[in-house]
Amino acid sequence: MADIKLTYFNAQGMAEISRLILACANQKFTDERMEREDWPAVKPTVPYGQIPILLYNGVVISQSITIARFLANEFGLAGKNNLEKAEADEIVDALMDIQNARYGVFFNKDPEQKDQLLEEFKVKANTILTHLESRLKSRGGQYFAGNQLTWADLQLFNILDALKVLIPAPVEDLPLLKDLEDRVADIPNVKKWIETRPKQQ
């Protein structure tokens, strides 16, 4: 069994997709959660001055999506061939457009600007999710790649979970995405992770 340590803050953020992959694959790992007051001292010591970082059998890997993609490949959640992997990667990239736009709203401190950004974000998120509904339908309606669970489906679940702080029911009118979200939530290892993961700050 691999020696795995994932380091991030006590938040879902950019590390949660990797945690979900590891949990879904039933892999033991050290879930190291750094206190934010400790970060300034650590920042100069890590690649690119960023976390998450993954320590995998003694090798440090940086960049959140690179980490998640590596873990998906390592544990059979990336797709069975290069074409399926590209289909999964496409969905993850589209979902990251939502995630990055969400951060722009979430961390904005100007109340007036934040309200405007939120309305713009809701339109953008709905547009992307509507495209994803169509992509899912075109691929059979069950999973995004290869008619089997991949990290793309886990990332949908992850991003929808994060979205609900700003948009309470983001896929209410998108039945295929809602069904996929519910099916991922019912995966025993995923359900166990959601129930037992640390409460974020």
Image (cartoon, grey):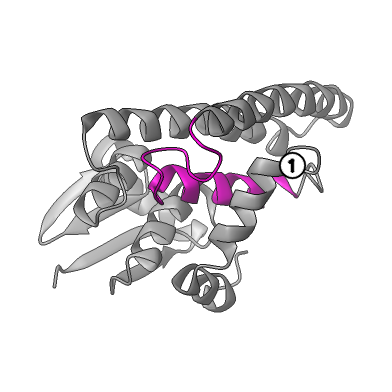
- Residue at image x 29%, y 45%? 67
Mark 1: amino acid: Val
- Which residue is more in the foreground, 70 or 104? 70
Query: What's the residue at 59%, 29% (across, down)?
Result: 132
Q: Which residues are magenta?
A: 139-164
Picture residue at 64% right of the left edge, 42% below the top: 177
Q: Residue 78, image x and y in percent?
A: 30, 44
Is 80 left, or right, of 191 in this rendering? Answer: left
Q: Secondary structure at mark 1?
A: loop
Residue 60 position (above or below residue 190): above
Whether residue 166 sits left or right of residue 130 in the image: it is right
Query: Badge 1 local density, few (<14 within 10 Å), some, or many (20+)?
Result: some
Image coordinates of residue 186 in percent, x first then y, are 57, 68
Is residue 99 on the magenta stretch?
no
Q: Nearer the viewer, residue 104 or 40?
A: 104
Asked if the magenta segment contains residue 145, the reply would be yes
